[in-house]
Image: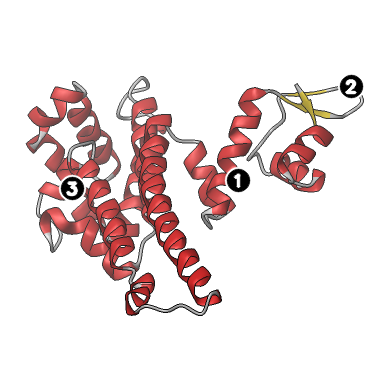
Amino acid sequence: MKSVNEVSKLSGVSRRTLQYYDEIGLLPPSAVKKSGYRQYDDDSLRRLWRILFYKELGISLDDIRLLLDNPKEVEKELMRRHKQLLLEKQSQLQKLLLSVERILNDEFDISMLRDFDKKRLEAAKKLYANEIRALMESSFFLPVVKSGLFPGGVSIVKNAANIMNLDFGKLIALCGDVIQKFGEARQDGPHSLAAKEAVAAYKEFINSLIPCDDKAFRKIGQAYLKYKEDLDKKTPGLAEFVYEAILHVYQ
């Protein structure tokens, strides 16, 4: 176990910031002594690393909370993609550093102009986006992207992202949130409060991609029956549950 002071020295994060993370529920301590001092175990320190990692990438605390509170596999998928982008940025910086060294030595070559070509980085970003779209097409969201309910068909996510400049890190976290809510609601039944909350989260997610009225959302529910066979291969009973939950709220 580490004290607040020890964690602060290890990470460079101030005690006040650690206290704030606790206050907003982002990083609760593992234990609190009778004296009121917070203590952190290895799991808490691992969580702090993840918080600092995402913060370094420019992700807001609200979005970080969304990422950390979702299934680990969803977060791992996101981190793998961020890793590829970081490696591409690292390669570009290394080339730039070499060119700076040459300029300091009064050297110049026309090939050094390529240091500012970001085509590879942009290609990596596109690959990142396409992989997330593919992840959605082969998962819980298959009926949405395959149903043709919205302009663009299977490219709904890609098109919406281009229009709205969505953060794909946030997008995949929202996907995980919807999946998790439906997974937890299944034990309570499609007419339960938990199912109603899952449906509300799903509709909010769809609306973040493209406007979706009640009628269109009912069609999404009906699409789950259409693709029941595909979905049941991975999660038996899921398609019918989602259909019943959506139609119960949006009759």
Q: Quadrant of residue 247?
A: top left
Q: Which mark is residue 144?
A: 3
- Which of the image's four quarters has the N terminus? top right
Evaluate whether residue 170 shows in this view: no
Q: Are marks 3 and 2 in contact (CB under 8 Å)?
A: no
* Percent x, y of residue 24: 67, 44
Q: Kindly identify the residue that appears in the image at 42 percent across and 37 percent down.
A: 75
Q: State which tag comes first along the sequence, 1 or 2.
A: 2
Relative to 93, residue 4 above or below: above
Q: State which tag comes first along the sequence, 3 or 2.
A: 2
* Percent x, y of residue 32: 80, 25
Q: State which tag comes first along the sequence, 1 or 3.
A: 1
Q: Nearer the viewer, mark 1 or mark 2?
A: 1
Type of amino acid at the residue the image marks with label 2: Lys
* Percent x, y of residue 156: 19, 58
> How many other residues sit within 10 Å of disc 3, few (<14), some (14-19) or many (≥20)?
many
Calculate the distance from the C-alpha at mark 1 to the C-alpha at mark 3. 34 Å
Q: Quadrant of residue 148?
A: bottom left
Type of amino acid at the residue the image marks with label 3: Val
Type of amino acid at the residue the image marks with label 1: Leu
Q: Kindly identify the residue that appears in the image at 51 percent across and 38 percent down.
A: 68
Give 240 or 37, whichever is nearer the viewer: 37
Q: Which mark is residue 34?
A: 2
As helix, strand or loop, the secondary structure at mark 2 comes to loop
* Percent x, y of residue 205: 35, 51
As helix, strand or loop, the secondary structure at mark 1 comes to helix
Q: Which residue is mark 1?
A: 52
- Tell me if 232 is positioned left or right of 50 in this view: left
- Tell me if 233 is positioned left or right of 70 in this view: left
As helix, strand or loop, the secondary structure at mark 3 comes to helix
> How many other residues sit within 10 Å of disc 1, few (<14), some (14-19) or many (≥20)?
some
